[in-house]
Image: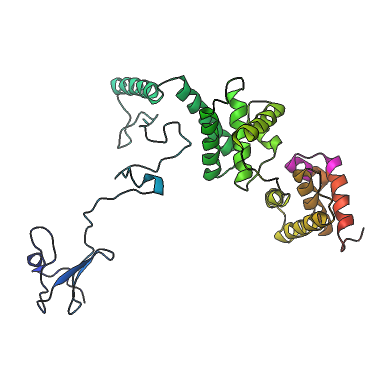
């Protein structure tokens, strides 16, 4: 039973908004803040429902923010040089109603944007960090990496800045190396060739910076497993799930026979996908696999024959 529209409902609330007495039995009223209701403790009558919670809407996103709670704003993020706490002025010259600004107001907004950008970075170190994190976000978006991988890459780059590891190395190579390491740590690896393709530096520079970060920051990165690439390659080739499962079985057999030792996980994944498609009589050529995986046809052909010989159910 609910009496949310009871004519005397306001009479049962005291001046300090505390529960009063029940209009039916005279019992004490209790406030159930979890369900936003005020009900009688004796008869269970609901005197008020859908009550407004007047308490502070603390935004706690993790344990580290518990001591510095705030009532407004998005969660902080390490993908921004200022942790996402600064103000951003929209680039569109329109007001809140979507109407175009007058020429004088457009000129004023342009000046505000200019000064806002100047205030967001206090020194050369922050300007470099802003540029590096922007590169990480750009490359992560091009590679289709999730937000948590970009966050990890940003944290790795911040550690490199704190350890003063950037002097003598290009900012782009360090940023690409941070993203490559974060992708491997997040179990969504991308090959070095894929990272190099979206970066502005050569492959050797990215590889050299990656090894440098591993050594200086003592990063714990496990070796890539070919299985981590199979799902993405099969999806890009539009293959059925049964072929993907067969490819994983081929890789397990190769690991049991020690065929995977000393071989590139990307080439093994590409060969496993092609071999599984070949066994399923799917319309996939070596050229298709080589184009998607960025592995040469010669390598694909050599690896897939090794996988098929290790498979007991293979007719070869």
Residue 292 against residue 33 in the figure, above or below: above
- Residue furthest to the right in view is 316
Q: Quadrant of the N terminus?
A: bottom left
**Residue 279 appears left or right of 154:** right
Q: Magenta span covers which residues?
A: 289-299
- Residue 149, image quadrant: top right
Q: How is the image coloured?
A: rainbow
Give the camera-side residue of 80 and 185: 185
**Residue 69 appears left or right of 298:** left
Tally of marks: 0
Residue ID at (77%, 52%): 273
The answer to whether residue 282 of the structure is visible from this angle is: no
| Percent position of residue 197, x then y | 67, 32
The answer to whether residue 65 of the structure is visible from this angle is: yes
| Percent position of residue 255, x then y | 80, 54
| Percent position of residue 204, x then y | 72, 28
- Residue 93, image quadrant: top left
Residue ID at (33%, 45%): 67
């Amino acid at each position: 039973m609910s009496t949310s529209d009871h004519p005397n409902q306001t009479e049962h609330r005291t001046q300090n908004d505390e529960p009063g007495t029940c209009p039916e039995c005279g019992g004490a009223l209790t406030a159930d803040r979890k369900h936003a209701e005020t009900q009688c403790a004796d008869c269970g009558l609901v005197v008020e429902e859908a009550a407004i919670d007047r308490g502070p809407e603390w935004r706690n996103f993790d344990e580290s923010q518990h001591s510095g709670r705030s009532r407004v704003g998005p969660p902080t993020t390490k993908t921004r040089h200022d942790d996402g706490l600064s103000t951003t002025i929209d680039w569109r010259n329109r007001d809140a109603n979507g109407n175009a600004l007058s020429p004088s107001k457009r000129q004023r907004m342009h000046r505000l944007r200019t000064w806002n950008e100047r205030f967001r970075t206090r020194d050369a170190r922050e300007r470099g960090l802003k540029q590096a994190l922007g590169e990480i976000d750009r490359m992560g978006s091009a590679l289709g990496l999730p937000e948590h991988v970009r966050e990890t890459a940003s944290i790795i780059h911040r550690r490199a800045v704190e350890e003063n590891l950037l002097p003598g190395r290009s900012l782009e190579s360090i940023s690409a190396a941070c993203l490559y390491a974060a992708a491997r740590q997040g179990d969504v690896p991308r090959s070095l060739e894929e990272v190099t393709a979206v970066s502005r530096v050569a492959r050797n520079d990215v590889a050299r910076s990656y090894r440098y970060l591993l050594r200086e920051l003592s990063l714990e990165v496990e070796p890539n497993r070919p299985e981590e690439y199979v799902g993405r390659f099969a999806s890009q080739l539009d293959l059925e799930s049964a072929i993907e499962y067969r490819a994983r079985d081929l890789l397990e057999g190769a690991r049991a026979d020690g065929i995977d030792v000393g071989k590139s996980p990307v080439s093994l994944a590409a060969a496993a996908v092609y071999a599984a498609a070949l066994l399923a009589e799917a319309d996939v050529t070596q050229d298709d696999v080589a184009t998607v995986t960025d592995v040469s046809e010669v390598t694909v052909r050599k690896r897939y024959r090794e996988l098929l010989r290790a498979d007991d159910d293979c007719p070869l």
